């Protein structure tokens, strides 16, 4: 839906360190991942960040946090039900990214 798409774009444009995907990529390199495997590792790194973002959306609801990264939390702007659906969408997206990888060598 447009609401979910707009909220996901807002969430990823809001900044953050993006440390988790960088660590995923660096760990793969440090443990000898081949160039061929790195395409899957990039998908895995994206899934890690999407999963983390999903957990933040849900966590803000449970903690009743008013802000996230200096802006109103999703549940404050959208309501709890809509924000929970955005978080669920992100969880599902992370699952699809991981499932499409299959298995890593």
Image: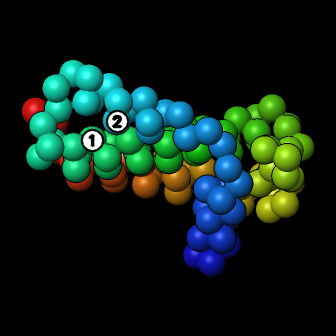
Where does residue 12 sit, x and y in percent of width and height?
61, 56
Residue 4 shows in the view: no
Q: Is residue 44 above or below residue 19?
A: below
Q: Which residue is mark 2?
A: 25
**Mark 2, mark 1: which one is toward the viewer?**
2
Residue 18 is labelled as none
Front residue (pair 12, 85) = 12
On the image, which quarter does residue 6 sit in?
A: bottom right
Is disc 2 placed on a helix, strand or loop? helix
Q: Which residue is mark 1?
A: 41
Q: CA distance from mark 2 to mark 1?
A: 7 Å
Front residue (pair 97, 38) = 38
Quadrant location of the N terminus in the rendered image: bottom right
Number of residues whose C-alpha sits closer than 10 Å to that of mark 1, classed few (under 14), some (14–19) or many (20 or more): many
In the rendered structure, the answer to whether residue 62 lies left or right of residue 70 reads: left
In the rendered structure, the answer to whether residue 80 lies left or right of residue 96 reads: right
In the rendered structure, the answer to whether residue 72 lies left or right of residue 32 reads: right
Tell me the residue at 49%/42% (across/down): 49
Is disc 1 placed on a helix, strand or loop? helix
Q: Earlier in the sequence, mark 2 or mark 1?
A: 2
On the image, which quarter does residue 102 sit in?
A: top left
Tell me the residue at 62%/65% (across/down): 9
Tell me the residue at 25%/30% (across/down): 29
Residue 105 shows in the view: yes
Where does residue 105 sit, x and y in percent of width and height?
10, 33
Tell me the residue at 21%/43% (across/down): 38
Number of residues whose C-alpha sits closer than 10 Å to that of mark 2, classed few (under 14), some (14–19) or many (20 or more): some
Q: Is residue 90 above or below residue 33?
A: below
Tell whether label 1 touches label 2 (CB within 8 Å). Answer: yes
């Amino acid at each position: 839906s447009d609401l979910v798409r707009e909220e996901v774009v807002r969430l990823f444009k809001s900044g953050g360190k993006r440390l988790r995907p960088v660590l995923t990529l660096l760990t793969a390199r440090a443990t000898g991942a081949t160039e061929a495997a790195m395409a899957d590792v990039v998908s895995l790194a994206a899934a890690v960040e999407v999963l983390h973002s999903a957990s933040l959306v849900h966590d803000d609801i449970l903690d009743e946090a008013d802000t996230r990264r200096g802006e109103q939390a999703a549940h404050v702007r959208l309501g709890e039900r809509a924000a929970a659906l955005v978080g669920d969408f992100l969880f599902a997206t992370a699952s699809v990214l991981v499932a499409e990888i299959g298995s890593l060598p």
